[in-house]
């Protein structure tokens, strides 16, 4: 088979944020880019039908500030994936990723996602079709197995066949997917994590760039994984606790730029929010992604409550965020004064 391998070294995949449906939209990505300049970001999964026939500005449009940015495609028709990859490259994406990991019934009915692990030759052909028509990297995101096809030998066979496409970047979620009997949410928690299996794939295929994903909650864990694989993809933790990423640039990209505070990040979003509101958007479409920014800090509950109660009201603007910050800091001061008094009394 002809070697369609594309250069991928221009993208540093040391740390990335996973594609997550309903979460990693353009507003969340713009927000995350305020925290880290270098972490690789991914879109939500977009189907080939949506890319080819849908409202592209709404579905795949993005702000240049979001780069480096990869698009994740859902599909199983090589011709449609090739068309979609061409469009993605024309729109300026840095990478095209094929979803071979999503276990939802809706995705399976469209014959894409994790069910494609049962058809490695088709996955190979899909990746080959995209690689032949674009110059940007074409990558794949998959699981360690599906249903009872979950041995290391089966994963090894899958990787062996798929890499014939020239794809040399495999993002592997270290859980298998149960396609029948578990919901997508359950598939993110119930199947046990098997990091060692992903490590072993890297050992068996040293020429491939292997990115590990699944249940990773700290930068310390990222460093451990990077002793075994080439990159780490963080999922839900990066959404629920986004300030986790504040040290990524210094620790993994040797960029010791000034780190913005949480409040500075909020204020830096105001021009973007104002533009969104002027174009007919709603505050809640952006503010919903900010709720985890102050996770575990005193007064964070007041910040979340103010936004949750006010952001979806008619005419809501940045004053909602200003009030949320004020409420949080007021409560923080009350808590600190109370603790100081308790310390003094003791």
Image (cartoon, grey):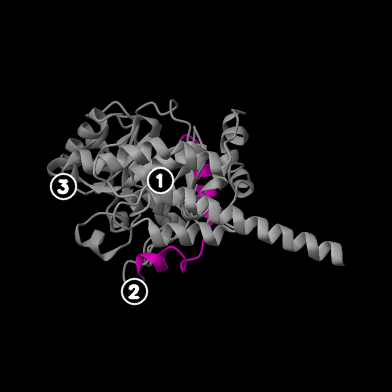
Location of residue 160 in the rendering, given as x and y in whole percent from the top left corner: 38, 44
What residue is shown with label 2? 181
Instruction: Out of 329 and 108, give the one closest to the viewer.
Output: 329
Apparent side of residue 246 relative to residue 151 in the rendered image (left or right): right
Instruction: Using the numbered discs, state the Cα–Cα distance from disc 2 to disc 3 in whole angstroms.
Output: 28 Å
What residue is shown with label 1? 318
Location of residue 326 in the rendering, given as x and y in whole percent from the top left corner: 54, 51
> Which span is picked out in magenta?
183-207
Residue 198, magenta (yes or no): yes
Location of residue 346 in the rendering, given as x and y in whole percent from the top left corner: 87, 67
Give the residue displayed 34% in from the left and 52% down from the top: 316
225 up-or-down from 346: above or below: above
Apparent side of residue 232 relative to residue 164 in the rendered image (left or right): right
149 up-or-down from 17: above or below: below
Give the residue displayed 61% in from the left and 33% down from the top: 250
| Quarter-of-image position of residue 68 | top left
What residue is shown with label 3? 49
- Label 2 near label 1: C-beta < 8 Å? no
220 up-or-down from 169: above or below: below
Counting residues from the start of the chain, the first of labels 2 and 3 encountered is 3
């Amino acid at each position: 088979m002809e070697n369609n391998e594309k250069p991928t070294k221009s993208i540093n995949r040391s740390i990335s944020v996973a594609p997550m449906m309903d979460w990693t939209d353009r507003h969340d990505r713009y927000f995350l880019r305020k925290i880290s300049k270098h972490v690789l970001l991914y879109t939500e999964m977009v189907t080939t039908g949506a890319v080819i026939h849908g409202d592209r500005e709404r579905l795949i449009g993005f702000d240049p500030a979001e780069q480096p940015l990869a698009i994740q495609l859902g599909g199983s028709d090589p011709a449609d994936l090739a068309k979609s990859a061409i469009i993605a490259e024309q729109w300026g994406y840095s990478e095209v990723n094929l979803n071979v990991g999503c276990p939802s019934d809706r995705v399976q009915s469209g014959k894409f996602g994790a069910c494609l692990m049962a058809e490695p030759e088709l996955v190979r052909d899909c990746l080959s079709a995209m690689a032949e028509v674009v110059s940007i990297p074409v990558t794949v995101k998959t699981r360690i197995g599906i249903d009872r096809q979950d041995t290391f030998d089966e994963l090894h066979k899958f990787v062996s066949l798929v890499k014939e496409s020239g794809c040399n970047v495999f993002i592997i979620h270290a859980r298998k997917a149960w396609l029948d009997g578990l919901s997508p949410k359950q598939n993110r928690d119930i199947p046990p994590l098997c990091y060692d299996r992903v490590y072993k794939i890297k050992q068996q295929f040293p020429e491939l760039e292997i990115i590990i994903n699944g249940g990773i909650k700290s930068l310390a864990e990222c460093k451990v994984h990077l002793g075994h694989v080439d990159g780490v993809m963080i999922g839900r933790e990066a959404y629920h606790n986004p300030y986790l990423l504040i040290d990524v640039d210094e620790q993994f990209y040797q960029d010791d730029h000034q780190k913005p505070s949480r409040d500075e990040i909020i204020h830096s979003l105001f021009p973007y929010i104002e533009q969104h509101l002027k174009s007919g958007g709603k505050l809640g479409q952006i503010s919903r992604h900010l709720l985890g920014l102050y996770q575990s800090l005193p007064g964070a509950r007041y910040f979340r409550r103010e936004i949750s109660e006010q952001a979806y009201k008619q005419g809501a603007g940045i004053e909602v965020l200003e009030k949320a910050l004020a409420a949080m800091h007021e409560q923080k001061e009350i808590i600190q004064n109370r603790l100081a008094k308790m310390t003094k009394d003791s």
